[in-house]
Image: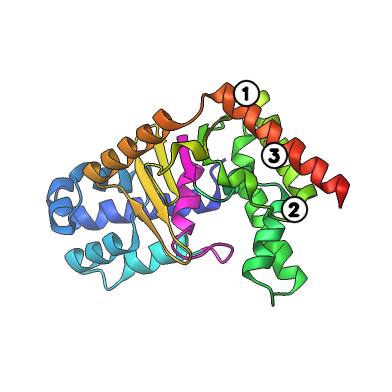
């Protein structure tokens, strides 16, 4: 059974097709007017890919639909559990066949333990209620379920060694977090590589996420403290992929990376015992 949100996107696509045809436009013609390809318009109509808000606004302007598609798009993308710029990324994660991530400082959200996430949320929201913090933690743990599904995407993370050394939540929480990474790797559900300190300047300094799909072009996503950008322009995605390839080239092998993660976990465990 289709999920309610997916059904709503299918309605979006059906309405887009109906109103486009009523306006006498082909997919290619509408695409040219809203600055995307005709293939993208077809994917919007089939609910394979979701348009970004600015594209929906241009569709409204072109088809003279009085903000209908922008309002519907905003309603579907808006999720109170996530920042407005990140909600579309969460939607795409559920459709991805492959997810590649680089993180320079923190364990990626899909790989975090509840204790690690809680420490991050408390640090960023020190005045929030305990209930609000727990809701944030629950939302992140819900995202992580996609790695447990039978149709889980291929997941490959590259982490800078800094990720293993920042004591998020204290030594005990860090030991548990790194043990969790080890378990995921040893169960062959994910692949992790570490960029060691000895590399010096890494090819990237900001988080980077690449996603591939069954019937849609790949996307790239970058994220800052309070902003993010979903990129699907082919040249930009290609350049982002090249950066990820450079990260792979300088990272330790998967086996050596696993040994480093296990060593760091043991260091944190011993630190926890001393305190």
Does 84 lie within the magenta span? Answer: yes
Query: Is residue 8 highlighted in magenta?
Result: no
Q: Which residues are magenta?
A: 79-103
Q: Residue furthest bottom?
A: 127
Q: Which residue is mark 2?
A: 115
Tell me where residue 266 appears, x and y as whole percent: 76, 36
Depth-wise, is mark 3 or mark 1 nearer the camera?
A: 3
| Above or below for 272 versus 98 | below
Secondary structure of residue under mark 1: loop
Q: Closer to the camera, 164 or 35?
A: 164
Q: Is residue 33 left or right of residue 263?
A: left
First in sequence: mark 2 or mark 1? 2
* Residue for point 56% across, 66% down: 80
Check the picture and name the quadrant holding the N terminus.
top right
Residue drawn at 67 percent across, 49 percent down: 141
The crowding category of the residue bearing disc 1, from other C-alpha atoms within 10 Å (few below 14, some 14 to 19, many at least 20), is few
The residue located at (51%, 53%) in the rendering is 5
C-alpha distance separating marks 3 and 1: 16 Å
Q: Residues within 10 Å of mark 3 (few under 14, many from 20)?
A: many
For mark 2, give the secondary structure: helix
Spatial separation of the CA atoms under disc 3 and disc 2:
12 Å
Residue position marked by numbered label 1 in the rendering: 188
Reading the image, the residue beneath label 3 is 178
Coordinates of residue 91 in the picture (x, y in percent): 48, 50
Question: At numbered mark 3, what does the secondary structure look like: helix, strand or loop?
Answer: helix
Seen at 47% across and 42% down, the residue is 102
């Amino acid at each position: 059974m289709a999920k309610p949100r997916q059904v709503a996107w299918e309605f979006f696509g059906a309405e887009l097709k109906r109103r486009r045809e009523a306006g006498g436009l082909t997919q290619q013609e509408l695409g040219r007017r809203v600055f995307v390809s005709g293939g993208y318009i077809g994917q919007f109509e089939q609910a394979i890919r979701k348009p970004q808000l600015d594209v929906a606004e241009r569709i409204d302007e072109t088809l003279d639909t009085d903000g209908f598609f922008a309002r519907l798009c905003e309603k579907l993308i808006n999720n109170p559990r996530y920042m407005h710029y990140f909600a579309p990324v969460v939607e795409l994660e559920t459709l991805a066949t492959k997810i590649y991530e680089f993180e320079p400082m923190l364990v990626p959200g899909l790989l975090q333990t509840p204790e690690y996430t809680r420490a991050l949320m408390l640090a960023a929201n020190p005045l929030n209620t305990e209930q609000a913090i727990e809701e944030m933690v629950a939302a992140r743990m819900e995202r992580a379920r996609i790695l447990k599904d039978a149709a889980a995407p291929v997941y490959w993370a590259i982490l800078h060694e800094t990720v293993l050394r920042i004591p998020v939540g204290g030594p005990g929480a860090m030991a548990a977090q790194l043990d969790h990474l080890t378990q995921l790797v040893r169960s062959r559900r994910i692949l992790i590589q570490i960029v060691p300190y000895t590399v010096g300047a890494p090819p990237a300094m900001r988080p980077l996420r690449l996603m591939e799909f069954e019937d849609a072009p790949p996307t790239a996503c970058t994220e800052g403290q309070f902003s993010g950008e979903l990129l699907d322009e082919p040249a930009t995605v290609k350049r982002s992929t090249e950066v990820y390839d450079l990260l792979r080239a300088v990272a330790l092998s998967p086996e050596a990376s696993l040994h480093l993660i296990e060593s760091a976990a043991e260091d944190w465990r011993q630190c926890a015992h001393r305190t």
